[in-house]
Image (cartoon, grey):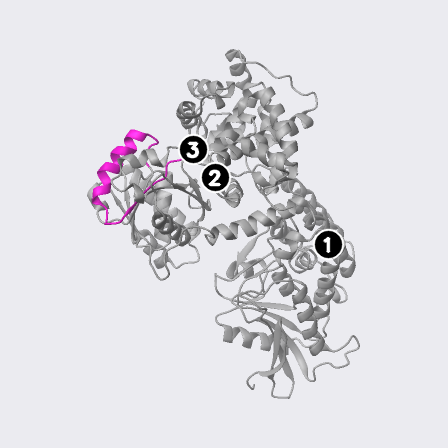
């Protein structure tokens, strides 16, 4: 076989050919759009169409490349294709424009898969969304055997569904049930797992081997068609309208509703288009998908989710507008000391060791260190499965548990995760700081105590900072970086570098009691307790939150963080913010603690527990509320309407607190409001974040609604001055 021969080139792709011994040719269609990635947009459509025209000629085959035996679709970039151009999708509002784009893409991919020659996708990099849909339009997919190569259809996580045929090709290729698991959950799989799940057909050990495998497959399958374009096509696992298929759809509908509570239409749309499309011929099924995609793509929900989950998160991950290290300068962090080996401290040690840092994990209790190391071993087996046993052990070997403060000597970064008590933390700071390396950073993982107050015990307050992580830290993607009054920019830049290496998305906020996320989180769970104290049915409180889009109901969350800790925090908060939390809900929490209802870890809270699992809300909650003699609200005779009202209160209680954090200068960037709320504390993802929600309501309308709520339920709902100013000026947080 000769070296490739260059045949065609435009701004999207180029075509080379491998000549076969008999004179035939295998064309390599290489995607290499301007910039660093290939993405699906109008330019892609024009360029790819021109390339197919060169290879295949017109619709009668006139002008077809002589001797064409097959096509390999490959990439000139690191990734195969990252999917739709979200810059376009964010602003596209005209349904006719979106529909035209989708139908054009459908026609283009249909032309590829009906080319009359075998087509292979050479997946040497990740193929996501529309990029993987392009791979599905090929007859065969070969991926590089590398865990860095990711494949999947994550569109539902942005409020839309696959729109380039993915909802119809994937079920026809792997079966309805396994396809729905991927489509409705927006799953992305690494190449080895993608092979096991049927998303790719082969793996290759190298790029060279992959190309040889592709050519071999093409020669072995002349004139192949997609299964659905052949006679006698049978659905893998059974037809959607068969008994098994109907059961799958019924179970799928129940599971989706249990997970989303109806707040996220995209997963429901996936179920609908797969079911409806399965009853039609393939081209008609694509029209079902196109209409559903268009309806979702022009919606406010999709726009807000795209802005936050893609643009805001990427900006946060790239640290846009934040202090940075000088070019070529290292953060100077080699050894990380973690103080406290509880669930948080042990998790921090594992995360830092996984990123390549040497870690000293100190506690005063041997049993805590033993438990932390046991958990680290479990996490290594769970989260580092792509590594060899030796590589996983090397990560664990980087963690050195100790009871001695002297073993902290020379550490470059300390993260303390000890008890939430100012005096205790001051004592720890004074003990540890003299042992550290010159220029070391001292960070506190406190969830509420002001960093400037903690830094009073430090000899170097300019290098004292808050690094607030979320539990479980191995799983939660966010870190809230709090700049104290004296924290300098070099310290922030070094901490941001640490966040990047440990793969955490950072937000940077100013100091103040509870910072940003804790204050908003507290507003949520306390409002949940307040609703129960008013005599509301706890089940309606939880369901109202879920229907509004919250990831977890406030009472379940309160149980998980423990009511005893919540009661302690509320006592501190009362000193800081007074009447804002001096409400019946606070009294209820105290009464729950007095009654021994301390939360999930203790087997009893707002919920009862059996073997560590929730077993329904506590039946005695009504009697406890009655005994407190608190004012009772009159329940709505329509529980559906009441749940909707309760969900609204839970959302707007948080929005009011977000605005106060902004008004008081703690929240410095609009993107951080959205990223911090959603990725840190589970704020309703369907809204795109609290600021997006307030924009969607309209600030004049929001101010009026909050004023009415403050009159009915107290000053915690009063709109902050920033909201009044913006409403008067007709302003928004984000462009319309």
* 26 or 695, nearer to the observer: 695
Residue tagged 1: 289
* 575 or 557, nearer to the observer: 575
Give the magenta part as a residue range: 418-447
Which mark's residue is nearer the viewer, 1 or 2?
2
Looking at the rendered image, the quarter that the N terminus falls into is bottom right
Q: Residue at x 47, y 42 (%)?
A: 668
Q: Is residue 260 magenta?
A: no
Query: Furthest-bottom residue in view?
Result: 22
Residue 472 point in image, percent of width and height: 43, 41
Q: Residues within 10 Å of mark 1 (few under 14, many from 20)?
A: many
Q: Residue at x 48, y 23 (%)?
A: 581
Q: Are marks 2 and 3 in contact (CB under 8 Å)?
A: no
Residue tagged 3: 514
Q: Give the spatial CA distance, label 3 vs label 1.
A: 46 Å
Q: Residue at x 72, y 52 (%)?
A: 294
Say whether disc 3 or disc 1 marks the residue closer to the N-terminus: 1
Say whether disc 1 or disc 2 marks the residue closer to the N-terminus: 1
**Residue 287 visible to the viewer:** yes
Q: Residues within 10 Å of mark 3 (few under 14, many from 20)?
A: many
Residue tagged 2: 667
Q: Secondary structure at mark 3?
A: loop
Residue 649 point in image, percent of width and height: 60, 28
644 horizontally vs 333: left or right: right
Label ID, residue 352: none
Q: Give the spatial CA distance, label 1 vs label 2.
A: 41 Å
- Looking at the image, is 420 positioned above or below residue 578? below
């Amino acid at each position: 076989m000769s070296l490739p021969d260059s045949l065609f080139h435009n701004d999207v792709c180029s075509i080379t050919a491998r000549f076969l011994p008999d004179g035939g040719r295998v064309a390599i269609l290489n995607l290499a759009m301007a910039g660093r990635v290939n993405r699906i947009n109008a330019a892609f459509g024009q360029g790819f169409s021109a390339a197919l025209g060169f290879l295949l000629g017109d619709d009668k085959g006139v002008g077809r490349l002589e001797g064409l035996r097959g096509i390999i679709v490959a990439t000139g970039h690191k990734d195969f294709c990252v999917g739709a151009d979200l810059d376009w999708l964010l602003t596209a509002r005209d349904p006719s424009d979106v529909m035209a784009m989708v139908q054009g893409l459908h026609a283009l991919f249909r032309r590829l898969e009906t080319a009359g020659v075998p087509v292979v996708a050479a997946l040497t990099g990740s193929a996501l969304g529309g990029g993987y849909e392009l791979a599905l339009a090929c007859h065969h997919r070969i991926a590089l055997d590398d865990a860095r190569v990711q494949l999947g259809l994550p569109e539902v996580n942005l409020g839309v569904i696959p729109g380039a045929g993915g909802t119809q090709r994937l079920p026809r290729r792997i079966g309805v049930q396994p396809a729905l698991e991927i489509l409705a959950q927006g799953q992305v799989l690494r190449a080895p797992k993608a092979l096991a799940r049927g998303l790719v057909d082969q793996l290759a050990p190298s790029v060279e081997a992959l190309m040889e495998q592709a050519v071999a497959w093409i020669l072995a399958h002349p004139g192949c068609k997609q299964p659905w374009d052949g006679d006698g096509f049978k659905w893998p696992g059974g037809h959607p309208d068969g008994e098994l298929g109907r059961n799958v759809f019924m179970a799928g509908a129940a599971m989706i509703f249990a997970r989303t509570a109806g707040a996220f239409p995209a997963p429901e749309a996936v179920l609908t288009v797969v079911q409806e499309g399965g009853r039609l011929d393939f081209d008609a099924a694509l029209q079902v998908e196109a209409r559903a995609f268009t309806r979702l793509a022009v919606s406010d929900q999709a726009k807000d989710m795209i802005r936050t989950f893609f643009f805001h998160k990427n900006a946060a991950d790239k640290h846009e507008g934040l202090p940075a290290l000088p070019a070529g300068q290292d953060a100077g962090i080699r050894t990380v000391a973690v103080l406290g080996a509880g669930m948080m401290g042990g998790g921090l040690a594992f995360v830092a060791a996984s990123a390549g840092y040497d870690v000293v994990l100190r506690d005063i209790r041997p049993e805590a260190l033993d438990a932390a190391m046991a958990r680290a071993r479990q996490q290594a087996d769970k989260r580092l499965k792509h590594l060899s046993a030796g590589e996983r052990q090397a990560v664990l070997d980087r963690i050195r548990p100790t009871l001695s403060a002297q073993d902290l000597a020379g550490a470059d970064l300390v993260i303390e995760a000890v008890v939430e008590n100012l005096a205790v933390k001051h004592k720890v700071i004074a003990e540890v700081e003299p042992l550290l390396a010159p220029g070391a950073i001292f960070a506190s993982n406190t969830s509420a105590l002001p960093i400037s107050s903690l830094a009073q015990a430090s000899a170097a307050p300019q290098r004292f900072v808050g690094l607030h992580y979320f539990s479980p830290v191995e799983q939660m993607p966010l870190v809230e970086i709090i700049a104290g009054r004296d924290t300098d920019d070099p310290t922030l830049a070094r901490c941001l570098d640490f966040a990047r290496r440990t793969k955490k998305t950072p937000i940077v906020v100013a100091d103040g009691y509870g910072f940003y996320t804790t204050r908003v989180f507290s507003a949520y769970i306390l409002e949940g307790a307040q609703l129960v104290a008013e005599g509301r049915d706890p089940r309606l409180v939880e369901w109202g939150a879920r229907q509004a889009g919250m990831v977890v109901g406030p009472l379940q969350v309160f149980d998980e963080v423990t009511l005893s800790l919540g009661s302690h925090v509320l006592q501190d908060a009362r000193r800081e913010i007074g009447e804002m939390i001096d409400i019946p809900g606070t009294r209820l929490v105290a009464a729950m603690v007095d009654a021994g209802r301390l939360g999930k870890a203790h087997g009893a809270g707002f919920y009862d527990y059996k073997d560590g699992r929730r077993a329904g809300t506590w039946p005695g909650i009504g009697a406890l509320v009655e005994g407190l003699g608190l004012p009772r609200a009159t329940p709505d005779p329509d529980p559906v309407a009441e749940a909707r009202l309760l969900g609204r209160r839970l959302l707007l209680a948080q929005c009011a607190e977000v605005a106060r954090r902004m008004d008081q200068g703690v929240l410095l960037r609009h993107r951080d409001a959205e990223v911090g709320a959603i990725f840190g504390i589970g704020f309703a993802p369907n809204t795109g974040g609290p600021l997006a929600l307030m924009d969607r309501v309209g600030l004049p309308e929001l101010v009026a609604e909050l004023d009415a709520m403050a009159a009915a339920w107290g000053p915690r709902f009063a709109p902050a001055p920033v909201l009044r100013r913006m409403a008067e000026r007709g302003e928004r947080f984000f462009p319309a």
